[in-house]
């Protein structure tokens, strides 16, 4: 028999069936399910870690703090960047901004911020957010 992916088997005795407790007395692990009689260890709801004395260790480990928002952050483009990369009457969209290397990804939202003075006329904005100061400069 040749050796190939579908003929590989583990060695004899390498795998062992999991102990299934609480499945009747005929299984040998019924009634008390291998937990003995009374006491804290026999009760449900007591974590194995607490039982094994690992609780102290768990509390000593530094936790990852804070909150990570699922909402994507805006990619920022300033008016000064638009002045140096576009001409009068151009359309400003994520596609054109990506072509000019002003943003990194087309999937993330884009916001135009008002750092600088807008010198271009008749710009068309499509699928981009505008800050309040930019809206005023356009008007």
Image: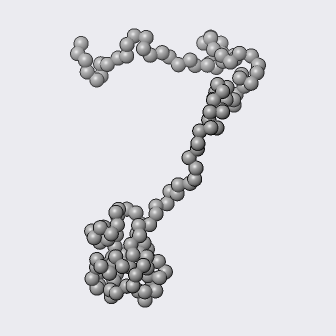
Where does residue 139 sit, x and y in percent of width and height? Answer: 43, 89
| Residue 2 visible in the snapshot | yes
Q: Nearer the viewer, residue 38 or 26?
A: 38
Where does residue 36 sit, x and y in percent of width and height? Answer: 71, 15
Left or right: 52 in relation to 83: right
Q: How is the image coloured?
A: one colour
Please tell me in which quadrant of the rendered image residue 48 appears.
Answer: top right
Image quadrant holding the N terminus, namely top left
Where does residue 85 sit, x and y in percent of width and height? Answer: 28, 77
Residue at the image position 67 percent from the left and 29 percent from the top = 50
Please tell me in which quadrant of the rendered image residue 56 appears.
Answer: top right
> Relative to 128, is 124 above or below?
below
> Relative to 69, is 93 above or below?
below
> Relative to 61, is 7 above or below?
above
Residue at the image position 65 percent from the left and 12 percent from the top = 25
> Relative to 34, is 74 above or below?
below
Q: Nearer the viewer, residue 139 or 17?
A: 139
Left or right: 17 in relation to 46: left
Please tell me in which quadrant of the rendered image residue 11 appears.
Answer: top left
Q: Nearer the viewer, residue 56 or 3?
A: 56
Residue at the image position 47 percent from the left and 77 percent from the top = 131
| Residue 47 visible in the snapshot | no
Left or right: 57 in relation to 43: left
Q: Residue furthest left?
A: 2
Q: Nearer the viewer, residue 21 or 100?
A: 100
């Amino acid at each position: 028999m040749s050796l190939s992916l579908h003929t590989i088997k583990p060695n004899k005795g390498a795998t062992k069936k999991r102990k299934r407790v609480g499945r009747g007395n005929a299984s040998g692990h019924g009634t008390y399910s291998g937990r003995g009689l009374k006491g804290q260890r026999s009760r449900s709801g007591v974590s194995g870690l607490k039982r094994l004395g690992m609780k102290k260790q768990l509390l000593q480990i530094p936790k990852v703090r804070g909150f990570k928002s699922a909402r994507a952050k805006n990619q920022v483009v300033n008016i000064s960047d638009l002045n140096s990369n576009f001409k009068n009457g151009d359309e400003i969209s994520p596609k054109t901004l990506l072509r000019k290397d002003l943003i990194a990804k087309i999937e993330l939202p884009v916001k135009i911020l008002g750092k600088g003075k807008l010198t271009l006329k008749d710009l068309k904005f499509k699928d981009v957010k505008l800050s309040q100061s930019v809206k005023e400069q356009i008007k």
